[in-house]
Amino acid sequence: MNKAAVWAIARKDMRSMTSNKQVWISMIILPLIFGLIFPVAAVFLGKSMDMTTEKNLKFYHTITSNMPDQLQALLNVNPNMLPNEQIVYFILNFMCPSFFLMIPMVTTSMIAANSMVGEKERRTMESLLFAPISVLDLFVGKVLSAFLPALAVSFGAFFGFAVIVDALTYNTFHALIIPNANWLMLMFWVIPTITLCVILFNVLISARVKTFQAAQNLSGVVVLPVVLLIVSNASGLLLFGPLPMLIFGIVVLLLSLFFLSRIAKWNQRHVLFEKQIH
Amino acid sequence: MNSPYIEVSGVSKRFGTQQVLDDMNFTVRRGEIVGLLGPNGSGKTTMIRLLNGVILPDAGSISVGGHNPAVEGDPIRRKSGILTEGAGMYHELTGLQNLEFFAKLYGVRDQKRLYELLEQFDLTAHMHKLAGTYSTGMKKRLGLAKALLHRPELLFLDEPTNGLDPEGIQLVMKYIRELNRTEGTTILLCSHVLHQIQEVCHEFIFMEYGKVIEQGTNREIESKYVTETVLRVETGLQINADRFAGVSVRRVGDEVLEFRLPNKDGISPLLQAILQKSWVHEAVITNRDLEALYFKVRGEQHE
């Protein structure tokens, strides 16, 4: 692999991204809402809820009684916690991870979907395919250009989330509730592997379609439902703890590596050229 | 110096139902500037893509510097540079950033080379401006600088003068000539603007409907196709008949006459005869420039 060329492609795309205000603003809005504003609001709401009133207690029981047994058990994980504290603890540790899973995949899906077909629409794909770089170099560069910003945004949001949430809840729990083993496994293993896989699919779609609009549509129809399915089941995955998450990540990573090796085979230079230029 | 560098034999290419190239045959010698000429849609760009191995032929064989582009495209792409018709530069990057990016793809580490090329193509003052703000001519010159980054031994130029002003055309043509003379670069130049490339090319390949209809030097094609000499003379000579000094003549302008001679040997005696009667300001053979030859060759193919 030509590392210099791979980095050059990744850096060039990231530079284009950061030079476009609309792109980077849209990349920051989602993490800001779901990674910072929502958790902070949940903490304040949870802490300020008056659980002595019948109305609020009824509301609490309505929610908890509809939960699966495992989640109900989790809410009672620490019987010393007050219902308010349990709500805050539950939201932060079992609802927020879903948002953190969603952030990198949604923010970078469009970037990845634009990666190959964007070169075609700017009439620069020809220049890349005429260059002495392999198609695999091109794909890896494109994947990196979406993967690195995705991780940067996720880790940045997580750092902000951890600092703010711990600061706001320390007087309640008298301990730093974030991060814990589940969070660390999620942030530094599951999210990177699954984001890589989603980006790979989007880049593959981008190499196969003729317009960005088609890539966007296909990405929305094929990739997004799968992403949402995973995100909606993330709480379930967290219930099993770090080890199943580790195995899940390994499976996803192997799947990604398999697809990466296939991508270069399915997209030989002449196939890519005829698909994208003609 | 003159060993065949590019050999194309029986090459055909079809896109869907459209036969773009049909039994193409030609050779290019090392160190030559060869003009690949033909109307739009004659298959010139497709031929360049095949030579680079970015598309594959349906039939026939190609050799570029001893490599088959269909299976050994990388060595060819490493030693060749290309200027595509759209120049293919990134509009959101500056001129310098574009060159820095392509330098990395082509493995060029010498930053001085970038500044040297920017200077050569008159872009130093604009190197920090976004390429999207460049005029067509500037984009073309930047594209040319990109094609030359790695000092290629083979250069493909697809319509290099499209969109350039006369000054730009002169600059590019001068550089092509110099490059070929000083570094011995083999250059394959596609164009449909014939008079611009007449002076720089050693040899020409005429294409039509995906076929080579003629290949040779200007002189070779002239001797094959030109059966008479058409001489246009700016003179004060008055004629009353359709012959003068035994040569067929017709008036084509106020003070311009067109003579048709069997060959060039008759030019001097004719001019002497005219000068005895009147003045002569200019005499030009009009049917042996590239454009005239091109139409002659195409005309004969259609007969």
Image (spheres, rainbow, N blue to C red):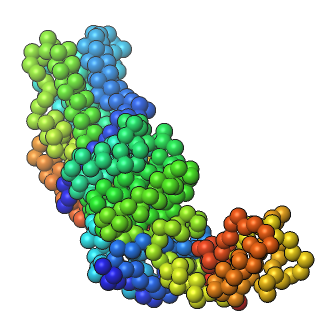
- Percent x, y for residue A147? 27, 45
Judge by depth and name the residue closer to the eye, B50 or B108. Answer: B108
Judge by depth and name the residue closer to the eye, A23 or A61. Answer: A23
- Is B86 on the left-hand or right-hand side of A175? right
Q: Quadrant of residue B260?
A: bottom right
Q: Quadrant of residue B156?
A: bottom left
- Percent x, y for residue B103? 28, 52
Q: Quadrant of residue A233?
A: top left
Judge by depth and name the residue closer to the eye, A139 or B178. Answer: B178
Residue at 23% of width from left, 30% of height from top? A156
In the rendered image, the quadrant that contains the C terminus of chain B is: bottom right
> Can residue A217 be seen from the camera position used here?
no
- Percent x, y for residue B76? 30, 71
> Can residue B127 be seen from the camera position used here?
yes
Q: Residue B33, relative to residue A144: is it above or below?
A: below
Judge by depth and name the residue closer to the eye, A194 or B267. Answer: B267
- Is B82 on the left-hand or right-hand side of B247? left
- Percent x, y for residue A180? 11, 31
